Image: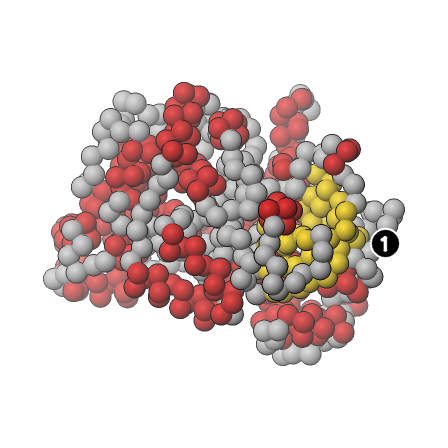
Amino acid sequence: MYAPPYPAVYRERLVNRPPELLYPQADVAERLALGCSDDALANGTKADLQAAKRLAKRLYHLDGFRKSDVARHLGKNNEFSQKVAEEYLRNFNFTGLTIDQALRSFLGHFALIGETQERERVLAHFSRRYTRCNSERVNTEDSVHTLTCAVMLLNSDLHGNNVGKRMSCSQFVSNLEGLNDGKDFPKDLLKSLYSSIKNEKLQWTIDEEELRKSMSELADVRTDSASHTMKRLGTGGNPLVGVAQQVDGELYKNGFLVRKVHADPDGKRTPRGKRGWKSFYAMLKGLVLYLQKDEYRAERDLTEEDVKNAVSIHHSLAMRAADYSKRPNVFYLRTADWRVFLFQAPNAEQMQSWITRINVVAAMFSAPPFPAAIGSQKRFSRPLLPGSNTKLSQEEQVKSHESRFRAVSSEQAELTASPLDRKVRGRELEEQKLRQEYLEFEKTRYGTYAMLLRAKQSSGDEDLATFESRLFDDGGLQRAHSSPTLPQDAANKEKIRCTKTSKSLKRQVLRI
């Protein structure tokens, strides 16, 4: 599915990050195994450097390591791993190569797997090495990193098992406007990269043993049927981004809905002739909302029209359409690419149920956003949000949402605290409004996700129907609230049938 433009600057600030040990115990053990004593580690950097060189050499030659082990050692956030990564990258000479050529060479040596931040650090090391090898040809390390991320995401869009339209060359070029240290990348360069990736996807291998391990871990935190959606990893597709057609995924809700298309990608108003209301039989399977013209029958396969109408709900938010008075029981659904749909449910109870199920599933399985490079840009653009299922545990997932809530809240506070110059007009003023709208929406979305997952954890219910019933029957959240997944004033709340009250849950969200 085509996703929104490439990332602007929304990186967590260091002040918001939890303190990390300089040398975690696992790292110390690794380095001791390489023949480095405790004293040597404590008394200077010379021993550190020698240990890093030895580990980097063994990783490059896969001496005692598998391809799936490499990224884990390169992507840790400590000084020793940074030295290992620097030494590892010295084995590559990217001089004179284009970004895609260098990436093909680099990714051919290991499997780029792991948590989002770990993968981003590995690509940052690649960008640094590429810049040093081509210092006369490229502007800065930051622009290289931006282009590297863009190429990786383009590869996912063109070759992933996505639902929806593929990105065009003109969209790829447009999405990178102003991201070359405030300037545009050469169009010929971007067109060449697009053509290269379209004709030959980036490939890297994942050990079968590692794949089985990953799927086993997923099964621990999801149902067996949900883990079936990960079968696409065996095809060599990009594990960073992409939503498969999740026809075998767990069915979270089904029933009749009437749909109206309100806005196209990037929030552009849908042409009047395409906005009409249409009835569908809806099925929420995994991260995909399938819309069929007839009631579902197990023996009938999905048609091309069914797939065309399908809506990916990764990083989406559903909310009651309180400002829409033409029809009753209507809710909005805004997707990751900022399309907006209106759905009418048969009654108020079903409307609330659809809102809750969509938001809970999106919160449970939406993968953390892929970090962007830090850099200046002329044009505001929203981050590209991964369509793949998260690999985080439930606790890690809610902490990820809380972390994003903090980062977005901080960004919004800074923007609000900086008064806009009265001389600002036209495009710059519009950019400011777009940024403010984006931050407000993301703050609501991540706050909603965090609140729902914390409430789900506290209730102890894995079955969404049971969780939903407890959520509302005990007054945890009000059915008529315009943002139904966010709590109202604590004075209006009653205790949820679990160990924590909704008031305490609200405090948890306010702390993030």
Q: Is residue 459 above or below residue 174?
A: below
Q: Residue at x 26, y 61 (%)?
A: 27
| Percent coordinates x, y for residue 30 in the rendering | 21, 63
| Percent coordinates x, y for residue 469 in the rendering | 72, 73
Viewer-proximal residue among 328 and 135: 328
Q: Amino acid at mark 1?
A: Pro
Viewer-proximal residue among 281 and 438: 281
* Left or right of 98, for residue 174: right
Location of residue 391 (image quadrant): bottom left
- Please state the total of marks drawn on the protein image: 1
* Residue 425 seen in the current view: yes
* Left or right of 153, for residue 476: right
Viewer-proximal residue among 363 and 442: 363
Q: Residue at x 37, y 58 (%)?
A: 20
* Residue 8 seen in the current view: no
Mark 1, residue position: 328
